[in-house]
Image (cartoon, rainbow, N blue to C red):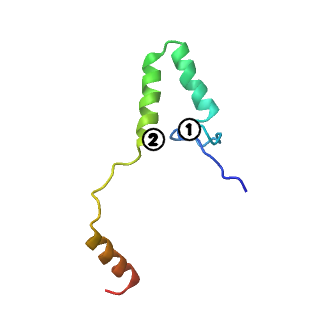
Amino acid sequence: MARAHICDVPRCGRPRQRWQRPCATCLSRLKEAFQQRRFRDHRLFKKRAAAHLAGPPRHDPVTPQQAFANTERLLGER
């Protein structure tokens, strides 16, 4: 069965093609804002997309000792 691809724009949820990031509707809204010279909206759409693609902030890396201790704790060996 083929994997479903969902639009990357927050609160959209529409299907998209495998090679696309935003769906056709969101992409057309972005292009429309640029063509209508609504540059403020265009910048806002780009910032939202960039923030969403960047993902959540990264946490401090886990040391190997912490990872081993966490695994032992999960397995009930400690």
| Number of the label disc, if any, that sits on residue 76 | none
Residue that lies at the very extreme toward the right in this rendered image: 1
Q: Residue at x 52, y 38 (%)?
A: 9
Q: How many marks?
A: 2
The alpha-carbon separation of the residues under discs 2 and 1 comes to: 9 Å
Give the mark nearer the N terminus: 2 vs 1: 1
In x, y percent, where is residue 19?
61, 39
Look at the picture and state if 5 lies above or below 25: below
Amino acid found under the numbered disc labelled 2:
Leu
Residue 59, by quadrant, is bottom left
Q: Residue at x 46, y 35 (%)?
A: 49
In x, y percent, where is residue 62?
29, 64
Q: Residue at x 40, y 38 (%)?
A: 51
Q: Image check: 69 left or right of 18?
A: left
In x, y percent, where is residue 8?
53, 41
Q: Image check: 57 left or right of 5?
A: left
Residue that lies at the very extreme toward the front in this rendered image: 64
Look at the picture and state if 59 lies above or below 54: below
Q: Image check: 41 left or right of 7?
A: left
In x, y percent, where is residue 64?
29, 70
Amino acid found under the numbered disc labelled 1:
Arg
Q: Tell me the element at label 1.
A: loop
Q: Tell me the element at label 2.
A: helix
| Number of the label disc, if any, that sits on residue 53 | 2
Instruction: Please give the residue where the numbered disc 1 appears in the rendered image.
Output: 21
In the picture, which quadrant includes the C terminus? bottom left
**Label 2 close to label 1 by CB (< 8 Å):** yes
Mark 2 surroundings within 10 Å by alpha-carbon count, few (fewer than 14), some (14 through 19), many (20 or more): few
Mark 1 surroundings within 10 Å by alpha-carbon count, few (fewer than 14), some (14 through 19), many (20 or more): some
Q: Residue at x 32, y 76 (%)?
A: 68
Residue 1, by quadrant, is bottom right
